[in-house]
Amino acid sequence: MAKGNPEVTLNILYRGPVERGHNWQDLFAHHLPQVKWHTWPNVKDKAEIDMLVCWIPPREYQQDYPNLKVIFSVGAGVDQLNIPSVPQHVQVVRMLDPGIQQGMTEFVQMSVLNIHRDTLAYVNMNQQSQWQQLPGVSTAKRRVGIMGLGNLGQAAAVGLQNLGFQVHGWSRNPKSVANMSCFHGNAQLQTFLQRSDILVCLLPLTDETRSILNQQTLSYLPQGASIINVGRGEHIVEQDLIDALNEQHLRYAILDVFAKEPLDTQHPFWQHPQIWVTPHVAAITQNDSAGQALLANVQRYLNNEAMAGLVNLSAGY
């Protein structure tokens, strides 16, 4: 593997799980020995730090690390970094980990199939010792809408197409995806939702997408539609979702992300018979593949090449 420019020395500060940090430190020591690896909070000279690798940065990092140039998110999302607070001269890079992509595709496929085959209803029947067969439809007649057509959204769409589902997508800005109808912007949101028997939310969290699934937009979904949220909890107005389920406008909701995590033990989502809660496990960063992705991006930086996953700070993703 290329060593990058051996004359350039970089200082990386890592903040995260210890085992992952050790793995990545060894990886960099082998492939990019000119990179000095620091583990937070053990930093002698904060002015030396060029790059920060973290999920949530240290408090007051803007002032404490005056020569910071890049923040690498260890996950696919970056909203937890509070993008408006990031200094304009600092580049932000989200994690494009094939392990995250594979995990998300698997979770979305699993969730869509569970809704498609009424698994949640049968689980509820099990608890009541109730024997009842529910009518079903073919995958070719089930329409799945993907909100968010980034790296994860497009991968999930392909995975669902491979299972035979009708898949279409929506994004804030125009996108073209092979073999899929794409909608964009507020003007086409209602049409997109009206065609979604199962809605998968994979949007980034921005001011424009916060609370995008509310009483009005949920009403656009077909009667008996279901929702899978693997974006961010703040995309959904919680009470509006509960109301849509209680009124039988929506059939199921599979929720992996929440406005406050961990989800409070008294939260109504836990006991709702039409909601399936999972603890933010749809796509977990894989140490090996994510380490390789991080290494490749640092090499690109050393070679003055564009880094993969670079975030537009103005757009927030």
Image (cartoon, rainbow, N blue to C red):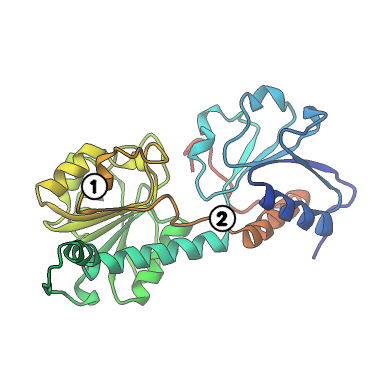
Amino acid type, mark 2: Thr
Q: Mark 1 or mark 2, which has the lower sequence index?
A: 1
* SS assignment at label 2: loop
Mark 2, residue position: 285
Residue 262, picture quadrant: top left
Residue 4, picture quadrant: bottom right
Percent position of residue 187, x then y = 24, 46
Q: Can see residue 219?
A: no
Mark 1, residue position: 271
Query: Left or right of 95: which side holds 173?
Result: left
Percent position of residue 234, x then y = 35, 38
Look at 81% across and 32% down and name the residue there: 48
Query: Left or right of 258: which side holds 237?
Result: left
Look at 75% across and 54% down and name the residue there: 299
* SS assignment at label 1: helix
Does residue 115 lie above or below 84 as drawn? below
Query: Left or right of 223: which side holds 314?
Result: right
Percent position of residue 237, x then y = 26, 38
Q: Quadrant of the N terminus?
A: bottom right
Percent position of residue 79, x then y = 48, 39
Label 1, residues with CA under 10 Å away: few <14, some 14-19, many ≥20: few
Q: Can see residue 274?
A: yes
Look at 73% across and 26% down and name the residue there: 66
Amino acid type, mark 1: Gln
- Mark 1 or 2, closer to the camera: 1
Gap in angstroms between the C-alphas marked 1 and 2:
29 Å
